[in-house]
Image (tube, rainbow, N blue to C red):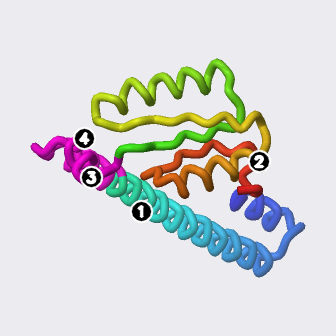
Amino acid sequence: MVRILSRLCRKGQFSHAAADAWICGLHTLQVNVLQRQKERNIRMKLKRTMAMLMAGVMCAGALAGCGSKSDSGSAASKEGLKDLTFVIASRDEFMSSIEAAMKVEAEPLGYNIVTQDAQNESAKQIQYIETAVNGGADAVICLPQMAPSL
């Protein structure tokens, strides 16, 4: 761009003052662009650093939870958590496999899984949840048919 301006000045098509103003403006623009790039790079480095820090904290928390010598299953049974109610919107092959996996994992730990199928009716889901709470269930796991209705 500077070369073009100097050629125009030599030919008399552009004044030296205007060319100097253009060059000064271009330099200012370049400085602003460089400053923005530096700021963007600093923000990106900060984001990467924070992401790495958060990942490290999460890994440390996960390892701390896994590294304890006490048995988490016995700790849960000491708290008296025995009856779990699993309320689903509709039974299908996927939900049946989830239910079976829950039962396989929960029984050795001393938990009883009771599954209720609401057959895609929000009112039945609400009724099953209320029945489980009134019946003394220690926990209710609900996969809602429509979340706003619950």
At label 2, the amino acid type is Ser
Dot 1 or dot 4, earlier in sequence = 1
Magenta residue span: 55-81
Q: Nearer the viewer, residue 67 or 107?
A: 107
Label 4 secondary element: helix
On the rendered structure, is 140 left or right of 62? right
Furthest residue toward right: 13
The residue under label 2 is 122
Q: Which mark is residue 73?
A: 4
Residue 52: percent from left, percent from top: 35, 52
On the rendered structure, is 98 left or right of 125? left
At label 1, the amino acid type is Leu
Alpha carbons under labels 1 and 2: distance apart? 46 Å
Mark 1 closeness class: few <14, some 14–19, many ≥20 residues within 10 Å:
few
Q: Are marks 3 and 1 in contact (CB under 8 Å)?
A: no
Label 2 secondary element: helix
**Image quadrant occupied by the C terminus:** bottom right
Q: Are marks 1 and 2 in contact (CB under 8 Å)?
A: no
Image height check: is 65 above or below 7?
Answer: above
At label 3, the amino acid type is Gly
Dot 1 or dot 2, earlier in sequence = 1
**Image quadrant occupied by the N terminus:** bottom right
Label 3 secondary element: helix
Residue 124: percent from left, percent from top: 74, 45
Q: Which mark is residue 46?
A: 1
Q: Nearer the viewer, residue 25 or 128?
A: 128
Residue at position x 55%, y 65% from top?
34
Alpha carbons under labels 1 and 4: distance apart? 40 Å
